[in-house]
Structure formats: C-alpha cells, structure tokens
Image (cartoon, grey):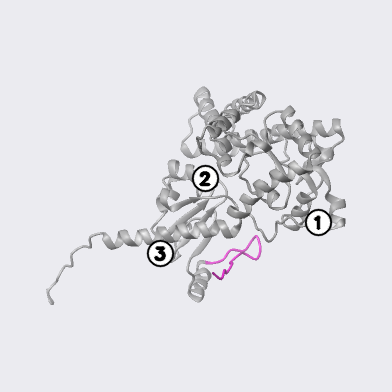
Amino acid sequence: YEPHVMIETADHFQYSELEVCRRILDLDPVMVLLLDHLRYESPHLPKNLPVLTWIQDPLGNLLCRRAGASIGPFDFVCGYYQERCVSEFGYPADQFEDTNVPVSARIFHDAEPDGESLARYACDICFVSNASDPVERFYRTELENYPPGYRPLLELIYHRAMEILDLDDHQGIGVAAQNLVRSAVAETGLTLDGAQTTHVSSHFAYRLLDWGRRQQALEWVAAWARRTGRVFKIYGRGWEKHPTLAEFAAGVIEHGEPLRCATRASRLALQLLGFRHQRALETLASGTLPLTRYCPVDFAGLPLETYVSQREAGLHPEGVATVFPRLERVVFRTPEEFEALAERYLADEAQRHEVLSDLRQIVLRDYTYAAVMRKVIGAFHASLVRRAAEQAESPRPAAVHTPVGS
C-alpha cells in the first residue's frame, strides 16, 4: 500500500469536509485510517469506503453507546480497550482486533550508541514517563476541575486509593478503579449517570492508582540507588520538580533515536504498568532488559506463584505471560524483590542477555508494525468478505411492477 497522510499544518487549522472529499476523489483510496475517531464523526465519508479506526486513548467519543452502534459493515476497529468497547458500549466483537502500539524496528534496534551518547546516557537503570505529578498534587488539581458537588466523592476515592496503594492490593488497576468508584458513589449518595461514572473512574480513580503505583515503585528504586550508589535516571517532563525524585531527573527525551540511545545505554530499564506496553517493547527491541512490577493482567489475574504452578502443571491460563516465555524472571512485587532482581542481572551479564534474548525475539516476531498491521489488515479483509457473503445470502425484497400510466 502507498500511504497518503492528511494532517493539519497548525493547531488552529482544520480541513474542511470539501477538502477531504476532494482528496478521496483524487486518490481513490482502498481504505481510510482514523486515529481515535470513528466514521460517525465524519458523515461526509462515502458509506462504502472501508474505514479502519485505531483506538489509542480512552476518549468520550469512543467510549460511548453511540460509538458502538455506529459501527457499520465497512468499518473495523483495532487498538486498545476492546473488552470495554464490546461489553459496555456495544462494539461488534468480530469487527474489533485487540492490539497494542507496535514497535518500529527501523527506529528501535540494538546497535551500540556512539561514544558521545554512551557518555551522556549511561546508567544502571532508567525509567521514561511524563507522569511526574505527585499523586496529591494531581488530586488537588482535580478537585478544582470538578463541580463542587463532587468534592465528597473525590475525597473519599482519594483516601481509599491511598489505602489500596499501602496494602499493595494486586487486583488490576482498571477493576480496582471501577470498584472503588462504584462503592464510593453508593456511600456518598451522589447520583451519577453512566457517562459520569465512567469519566470519574477513567480520568480520576484510574490515574490515582496508576500514577500512585508507578511512583511508589520509583521510590523503592530511588532508595536502592541512594544506598548502593547505583546510577538511576528518570526521563520525562517535570521530574526535576518532584519533591522526592528530583535528584534522578535526567530531562526530557525525544521519541526516536534519542530514546533508543538512552534505553540502549542503560543496563536495565523499568516498566511499571503492564508488560505488553509500547515502552517495554521498544526497550526490548533496543537491546535492554526491562524489569516490571507485577501486574495482575499479565498473569490472568492470578497470584504469581499460582500462575507459575499452573503453567508447570500443563495448564495454560490466559495472560501476557503466556506470550512472553517465563515472564516471571523480570517481575518484582516488593522493594526487596526489586533489589534482588536488579542486583542479580547487574552482576551476571550472561544471564541478563539470555533473558533479554528470549523476550526480544517475541517482540521482533509479533510486535513490529509489519507484524501487527499484517494481522489487522487480514482481519479487516476477512470481515469485509464475511459481510459481503451475508449480504449475498440475505433475501432481496420482491420487485413491485407498476403499470405505465397508473
């Protein structure tokens, strides 16, 4: 396929419907790819032009019943949130291919960085994220963004979220956020409709648990680095202002070659929310081993030991760990487990490279752009063929003969 990209030239510019239609007439495309938008938002698109939507973010235009009902015979969806889109919002299951953001094998590879890059980025372990706001600051900011009537609910959710973090409850963050909001709404007596509940769950409770769990683990790593003298670098916006982690801030890093070099120059990296994530995949493709905090979804919601024992007994529970061989080799749950894991791989380069090789080959085989898009396009093709066959088999209405002159 020969791609043609239409993208606005400035933040204040938007293509007109007429210009979009002109481009379609000129190019006669096989299909249109939309990022985070669906056909119903662009009613000027020809009804029989195949439209592929890539869902990247939990946006209101996607996580709603109207979106699910809008999926027609020439539409297909891929990306994140398949389970929610199908079960909550009515997306057709056979027109949604669950996938993650792929890795560009052209950008992320394991070639040694040049001497200047090595000198600049070398460290024992690194972490990359822009989620640098302390949880309490995020909470205080959000209190001002919601109507005053929400305050008792948000206060309760915040304090319960902090309790969950302190207990290190291993239920998945998505499930925990939904349960937390549901119980807090019932306790405070605030009346929320489905959309309001989803918003509070996705944009408030989930972020509290997500950012809180990540920064909790970063505090573990920081304490280890201070005590042992290991070099720890955190890349991203705002870390230099963090009240307890600022000493490890290494500045903003651009996606692409700078990120590849920074990752490759680090002996280990951190992945703190689910292993099958763009950052972990890019890290592996770049030739660096990521250590990951235990995430229930990676192990079919089971405790780590239970999952491993079931696998060794010949059972094959679902989960990311089914895809990545012996994923438990890079997983930690406590500060003590992290330190033991990090020290083991920093001391034993051969073992580190053995585990890296096992996990990296899965990325190169299944998670590159070529591999993922081949799978998505194949599923879209099968969907179109299936819809065409159904249309051909459906009975056609009988023709009505009207005599001339009647």
Q: Position of residue 26 (x, y in %)?
A: 51, 76
The 10 Å Cα crowd at callout 3, few under 14, some 14 to 19, many 20 or more, is: few
Q: Residue visible at 71% across and 43% down? A: 290
- Give the mark, 2 or 1, whose residue is nearer the N terminus: 2
Percent position of residue 8, x then y: 62, 64
Q: For the residues carrying marks 3 and 2, which lies nearer the camera in this image?
A: 2
Q: Is residue 324 magenta?
A: no
Label 3 with label 1: CB-CB less than 8 Å: no
Extent of the magenta region: 1-16
Write down the quadrant of residue 298 in the picture.
Answer: top right
Q: Is residue 272 left or right of residue 398?
A: right
Q: Nearer the viewer, mark 2 or mark 1?
A: 1
Q: Which residue is tagged 3?
A: 47
Q: Mark 2 to mark 1: distance in Å?
A: 36 Å
Q: Nearer the viewer, residue 287 or 373?
A: 287
Q: Say which label, 3 or 2, has the lower sequence index.
A: 3
Instruction: Estimate the x, y position of residue 239 in percent, counting from the top left.
Output: 78, 41
Residue annotated with mark 2: 81
Foreground of the two, 342 or 309: 309
Secondary structure type for disc 3: loop
Res. 380 image quadrant: bottom left
Q: Amino acid at mark 2?
A: Tyr
- Closer to the camera, 90 or 309? 309
Mark 2 surroundings: few (<14), some (14-19) or many (≥20) residues within 10 A: some
Of the residues shown, which amino acid type is indicated by label 3?
Lys
Residue that label 1 marks: 113
Q: Label 1 amino acid?
A: Pro
State the CA–CA distance, disc 3 to disc 2.
25 Å
Cβ–Cβ under 8 Å for marks 3 and 2: no
